[in-house]
C-alpha cells in the first residue's frame, strides 16, 4: 500500500509540475523511502548475518536517497560543478554497503575461508570504484568513459552494471533459503536500476529530451517497485525448511562465482589506468592475487574434505566387515570369504575345512564376573585364536556371533584340521583365564570341525558350516573342552581320512 501511494504521488507530481527540476529527485525518494522502511523492519526482525545484510541494504538505500536529495538541492540552488559533483560521489558510495550485503553470506562449513576472501574482493572493488571517481571530482569532469561510438557511457552506468552482475552471480551460492530470497530481491533491484538508468540516460534524455520533471522519469522507480513486489509477493512462498538442496548446477556456479569480482576490478582498473597506471595495475594484481589465494585454499579444503571422506568411508567399510569388540572379521565377511574360498577350491579340487568354536559356559562367566569382564574375555579369546593360527597358512578367524567363532582353513584336510584344532584348544586353555564357575577353574573352548571338497554344483558352503556346528554340538554334549570332527556325504573327505 505504501509503495502504491509513493508511486502515485510521484506520478501526480510529474504530471502537475513537469518543468520543475526537484520533481524527479523528490519523486524518486518516495518509493526508496518505502524500501528503506521495509529494510529496517526486516533487519529488526532478523538475526545473525541476515540481520547485518538487511542493515547494509538499508544503508545503501539511505545513501541513494541522500544522493537524490543532494541532486535536488544542486538543481534548486543552481550550484556550480564543485557543488554538483559531490552528490555523484554519494551515489557511488552506496556501492560499498551493497557489495558487502551481496557477499556477506553465513559461514560455510567446508569453505569457511571463502567469506573472508569475498569480503576482501568486495573491499578492493569498492576501493577501485572510489578511486575511479576521485580524480573525476578533482578535475570537475563529467564521468564519461573514453569509448568511441555514438553513445558515451558514464562511470555510474559502468558501476551499476558491475554491481548488478555481482549480485546476480552470488544468488546461487546462498547457503539458506531466507538468504537466497534476500539475494534475489537485491539482485532484482540492482538489475532493474542498471537497466532503467541506461534507458533513461540514452533513450529518454538523449533521445526524447523531456523536461526535468517529466513522467518519463517514473522509470527510475522501477527498481524499488520490483524489489517490493518480490518481497511482498514471491517471498510469501518461503518453505518451512531453510535448507537448500545441493545439485550439480549450484556446485558449478559456486566454483565460477569467485571470478566475477576480479573481472569487475580489472574492468574498472582499465578505466582507472587513464589517470594512474601504476595504481590501476596494483589493484588489478591484488585482485588476481586474492583470487589465486582463494583458489589454492579452496582446492586445499576440497582435498582435505576428500581425504576425510575417504577415511570415513574406509572406517565405515571396516565397521561393516569387522566386529568392533574383537576386531575380527564379522559374519558378513566370513560368508564372503567362504564363498571366495569355495570357488577357488572348486578349481583346485582341494579340501577346505572350518572350525566352529564356542567358549564353554560363557553365560556363567558373564553371570559371575559381569558383562564388562565378559567383553574383555571375548577380546582375549579372539587374540588367542589369532595367535594360535599364526602358523596356519591363509587361515581366517572370524566372530560368528555371541561367544562363537569360526576359523576357515583353506587347502586343509579333516585330519590336519583336527590337529590344528587341538592346538587352538590348548592355546586357549594354557592361557589360564580364570573361570571359577567350572570344575577346572580355567576358561576352555569346544571345537567342531567339518571338511569338504567343494563342487561346482554346490556353490554355497552353508552345508560346511552346518556340519561344523553339528560337530561342535556333539563336542559340548560329550562334556566340552574337546574337539570333534564330522564329515559330509558326497564330495567330502573320504571316511578313511577322517579322525
Image: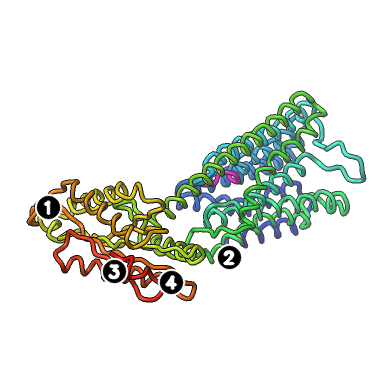
Q: Position of residue 47 (x, y in %)?
A: 45, 49
Using the image as rendered, state which of residue 152 and residue 436 is in the foreground.
436
Q: Which disc, if any, is residue 153?
A: none
Q: Nearer the viewer, mark 4 or mark 1?
A: 4
Which one is closest to the eye, mark 3 or mark 4? 3
| Nearer-the-camera pick, 154 or 174 | 174
Inter-mark Cα distance, 2 to 4: 65 Å
Where on the picture, by quarter, is residue 144? top right
SS category of the residue bearing label 1 = loop
Part of the protein shown in magenta = 101-106
Residue density around tag 4, few if under 14, some if 14–19, many if 20 or more, within 10 Å: some
- Residue 9 percent location from the top left of the image: 66, 58
Q: Nearer the viewer, residue 302 or 135?
A: 302
Q: Residues within 10 Å of mark 2 (few under 14, many from 20)?
A: few
Q: Which residue is mark 2?
A: 233
Local SS, label 3: strand
Q: Left or right: 64 with respect to 498?
A: right
If you read the primary sequence from the N terminus, does the residue marked by circle 3 or circle 2 appear first? 2
Q: Residue at x 64, y 57 (%)?
A: 249
Using the numbered discs, state the Cα–Cα distance from disc 1 to disc 3 in whole angstroms. Answer: 29 Å
Disc nearer the start of the sequence (1/2): 2
Q: Earlier in the sequence, mark 4 or mark 1?
A: 1
In the image, which is nearer the foreground, mark 1 or mark 2? 1
Amino acid at each position: 500500500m505504501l509503495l502504491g501511494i509513493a508511486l502515485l504521488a510521484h506520478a501526480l507530481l510529474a504530471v502537475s509540475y513537469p518543468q520543475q527540476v526537484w520533481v524527479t529527485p523528490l519523486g524518486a525518494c518516495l518509493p526508496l523511502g518505502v524500501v528503506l522502511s521495509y529494510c529496517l523492519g526486516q533487519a529488526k526482525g532478523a538475526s545473525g548475518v541476515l540481520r547485518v545484510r538487511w542493515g547494509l541494504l538499508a544503508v545503501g538505500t539511505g545513501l541513494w536517497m541522500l544522493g537524490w536529495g543532494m541532486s535536488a538541492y544542486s538543481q534548486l540552488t543552481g550550484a556550480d560543478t564543485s557543488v554538483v559533483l559531490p552528490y555523484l560521489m554519494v551515489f557511488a558510495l552506496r556501492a560499498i554497503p551493497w557489495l558487502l550485503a551481496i557477499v556477506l553470506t553465513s559461514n560455510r562449513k567446508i569453505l569457511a575461508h571463502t567469506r573472508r576472501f569475498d569480503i576482501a574482493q568486495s573491499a578492493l572493488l569498492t576501493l577501485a570504484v572510489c578511486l575511479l571517481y576521485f580524480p573525476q571530482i578533482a578535475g570537475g569532469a563529467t564521468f564519461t568513459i573514453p569509448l568511441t561510438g555514438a553513445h558515451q557511457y558514464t562511470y555510474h552506468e559502468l558501476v551499476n552494471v558491475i554491481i548488478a552482475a555481482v549480485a546476480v552471480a552470488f544468488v546461487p551460492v546462498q547457503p539458506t533459503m531466507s538468504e537466497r530470497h534476500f539475494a534475489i530481491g537485491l539482485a532484482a533491484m540492482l538489475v532493474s536500476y542498471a537497466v532503467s538508468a541506461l534507458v533513461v540516460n540514452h533513450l529518454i534524455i538523449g533521445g526524447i529530451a523531456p523536461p526535468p520533471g517529466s513522467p518519463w522519469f517514473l522509470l527510475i522507480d522501477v527498481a524499488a517497485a520490483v524489489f517490493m513486489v518480490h518481497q511482498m509477493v514471491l517471498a510469501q512462498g518461503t518453505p518451512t525448511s531453510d535448507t537448500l538442496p545441493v545439485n550439480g548446477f549450484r556446485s558449478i556456479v559456486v566454483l565460477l562465482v569467485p571470478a566475477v569480482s576480479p573481472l569487475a576490478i580489472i574492468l574498472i582498473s582499465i578505466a582507472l589506468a587513464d589517470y594512474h597506471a601504476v595504481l590501476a595495475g596494483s589493484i588489478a594484481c591484488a585482485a588476481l592475487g586474492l583470487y589465486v589465494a582463494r583458489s589454492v585454499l579452496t582446492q586445499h579444503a576440497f582435498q582435505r574434505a576428500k581425504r576425510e571422506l575417504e577415511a570415513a568411508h574406509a572406517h565405515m567399510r571396516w565397521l561393516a566387515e569387522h566386529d568392533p569388540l574383537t576386531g575380527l572379521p564379522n559374519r558378513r565377511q566370513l560368508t564372503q570369504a567362504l564363498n571366495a574360498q569355495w570357488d577357488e577350491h572348486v578349481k583346485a579340487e582341494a579340501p577346505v575345512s572350518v572350525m566352529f568354536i564356542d567358549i564353554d559356559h560363557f553365560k556363567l562367566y558373564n553371570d559371575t564376573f559381569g558383562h564388562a569382564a565378559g567383553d574383555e574375555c571375548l577380546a582375549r579369546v579372539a587374540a588367542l585364536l589369532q595367535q594360535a593360527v599364526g602358523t596356519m597358512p591363509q587361515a581366517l578367524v572370524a566372530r560368528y556371533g555371541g561367544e562363537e567363532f569360526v576359523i576357515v582353513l583353506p587347502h586343509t584336510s579333516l585330519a590336519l584340521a583336527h590337529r590344528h584344532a587341538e592346538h587352538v584348544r590348548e592355546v586357549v586353555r594354557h592361557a589360564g583365564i580364570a573361570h571359577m564357575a567350572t570344575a577346572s577353574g580355567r576358561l576352555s573352548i569346544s571345537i567342531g570341525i567339518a571338511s569338504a571338497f567343494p563342487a561346482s554344483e554346490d556353490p554355497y558352503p552353508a552345508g560346511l558350516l552346518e556340519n561344523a556346528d553339528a560337530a561342535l554340538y556333539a563336542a559340548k554334549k560329550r562334556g566340552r573342552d574337546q574337539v570333534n570332527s564330522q564329515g559330509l556325504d558326497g564330495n567330502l573327505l573320504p571316511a578313511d581320512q577322517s579322525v
